[in-house]
Image (cartoon, coloured by chain):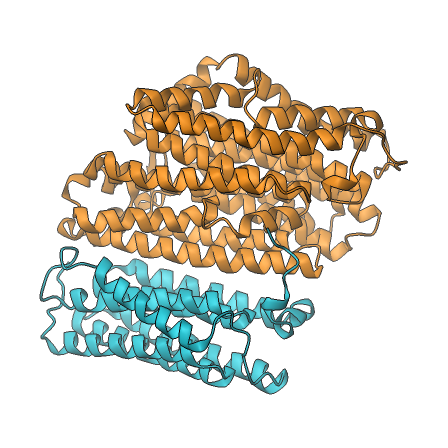
Amino acid sequence: MTALAVLVALSPLAGSAAALAGARARRAAVAAAAGAAVALGCSLALLVMLDGRAPLFGWDGFLYVDSLGGFFLMTVAGVTLLAAVGSIGYIAAQEDSGELGRFQVRLYFTFFGLFASLMLAALETGNLGLLFVLVEASTLASAALVGLEGRARSLEAAWKYVIISSLGVTIALAGTLFLFYSGSALHLGSNLGLTWPYLLAHAGALAPQSLRLAFLLAVVGYGTKVGLAPMHTWLPDAHAEAPSPASAMLSAALLNVGMYAIIRFLAITQARLGHTYPRAVLLFFGFASIVIGALFMVRRGNFKRLFAYSSVEQMGIIAVALGFGGTLGLYGALLQMLNHAIAKAVLFLSSGDVALRYKTREAGEVSGLLAAVPVTGGVLLLASFAVLGSPPFGLFLSELTIVRAGFAGGSPVFPLLLLALLGLAFVPFARTTAGMVMGNPPPLASPYRDRAAVAVTAAPWILGLAVLLVLGLWIPAGLDTVLRNSIAVIG
Amino acid sequence: MESLSATSTAGVLLDLSGVLILLLAFACLASKLFNRYVVYYGAQSVVLSFAAATAAVAFHSAELWILAVLTLAVKGIAIPVTARRLLVTRLALKRDAAMSTGLSTSLIAGGALTAFAYLVIRPALLPHGTVAAAVVPLSTAVILLGSLSMVVRRHTVAQLIGWLIVENGVFLGAITLVATFLFIVEAGIFLDIVAGVLIMVVFVSGLTRQLAEASAGELRELRG
């Protein structure tokens, strides 16, 4: 099992290796996709092996994989696979048109692999100090992707992203230190004492006052990476300026990794302090994010910014679900994370195709997508409705679960507020995407070399939509088991 | 882990270092000249290195010596010297007038944040009589002041140094709270590397040179 876990974290580096060896965009992207496929396969194998067995624990807790970690590994590896396949067409088209130089292409694939690998490694460690290190390192790797295009705007976005995220993660470090301090009574001398399973098992001995502070600092710190308002300001810029497959990685993988860190802190805090305090913190940041996300979607402009604000809103929904808590709330939160990851990956990847064809990222300048490129238009429209939580897609089911969890938790005020805000978000988002899809198209030239490239580009969108549709109609027994095992881990 | 008492020699020295670090954070916040901003930051790091050395002696910890030496070498000398040479000498940037608030406003805000830090770290959090009870509110104030510097300053390098001030605050707290943990040394080394990479990115790459010249206040295309 240890070998499998190591393979999960290392295999995305195949793309980096290919790029460093001098491969052109197509070959490097295929290598990256192959690496991601291996990572996905290994993480699925890990999940199967973890069912009904003790978590994988090794190297003094530096390596620790339980069902929760396995679930996130599967999500991140899946998104990496979609984004890597999406890169085959997108980056190659940009290389062919000369928008990206050879050096930039090399840079892209090197850091793409590194970014994925660091995120997967962060999900595989039980040591909370190493978790901080890996999350901060993944910030640096992904900043290179954000600034890749080298224009003043992308450099500004990359700078904002690095400096705000680094500040956030430093605050998370302060939270981690307070968590360790709260365990003073446990004499946490060795590395073993700094691991999550040890702290959870001995949660009863943690000092409540500093644990409260630790949890708040962790939510603010890792919440910066998640994009919870009001720490979300880097997110729209970074998502808008990064190449589309990299935006998909940021929105669908990185945000989930931040949320994963918050869930780990949440489990320890709940075990010691009960549910009231973490609930208040998570509901505050969650609703703030939903309101901010929904309000900023009203402004029509860059469509990738629109999707980015939708990510802020979605992360708010997930934080609210974690705040509602209980088995139902956690189930809804995890399911929502998986569904959102797939839907957002599809949206960003298909928006990359729009940006290539129309040579703009402004929603107002795009029209007639359905007439000009029916596949892209159809996918964009369906994925938009999926993200907004319409049936029959997966997000409808998970949002329903979250609202039910809210009603089960007592006061109907919060679930009703959530429903109202979801409705509010629907209008501006659907208005913008509908405007892009309808109308008469301008004359367009295909940016791809041949029909095969078009098919490869569209493959991850179709696959993602199919998975979303399946998840909206029925939860496979295997996934249900994984979700229940994950919830059992965090209690 | 044992905690130092506030009246031991090491405790008094740590407390004193904490006060100096806070004062230097205020000095950074108040300095309009780039030159001085960088020098005050360097001085703050030197004091932090002294505090780490004090803790190293008190806890007989070889690892904390590493932290002390690294802090002195990287943050006390290398970063201030590089920043000064590149900004003041090569780019002839003397004044950092790009602040989004007036000097007095930011100082008043800094004072309010310091008071807030003392309110948040109530006595209930830390046992009375330990040095941590005295120093952690100071370090929290330094973290907040560093964040404030990042907010009010528009120049990219000034923001970066603001982040490094935050980091100094975190490590001041760390060496009084959890000094015996090997982890803080590792985290310190790692963050030094991150700071080094960021400085390299800002200075070395030809493209980011424009970024260093244009203050971030002028980079406002991305809004809303």
Of the 4 image quadrants, the one containing the C terminus of chain A is: top left
Q: Tell me if residue B63 can be seen.
A: no
Where's the N terminus of chain A, which quadrant?
top left
Q: Is residue B60 left or right of residue A157?
A: left
Residue shown at 55% from the left, 69% from the top: B156
Look at 71% across and 59% down and name the residue there: A151
Q: Is residue B123 above or below residue A402?
A: below
| Colour chosen for chain B | cyan
Q: In terms of depth relative to the viewer, which is nearer, A265 or B33? A: B33
Give the residue at x 54% y 79%.
B96
A196 or A289: nearer the eye? A289
Q: Quadrant of residue A357?
A: top right
The hue of chain A in the figure is orange
> Where does the image place residue A432, in percent across and percent down from the top left?
68, 34
Which one is nearer the viewer's eye here, B181 or A460?
A460
Relative side of B92 to A482, left or right: right
Q: Position of residue A489 (x, y in %)?
A: 31, 29
- Total marks drawn? 0
**Res. A162 in view:** yes
- Residue B153: x and y in percent read 50, 70
The spot of residue A102 in percent (x, y) is: 77, 54
Q: Nearer the viewer, residue A458 or A171?
A: A171
Q: State whether residue A78 is above or below residue A147.
A: above
The residue depicted at 50 percent of the width and 68 percent of the height is B159
Judge left or right: residue A378 versus residue B84.
right
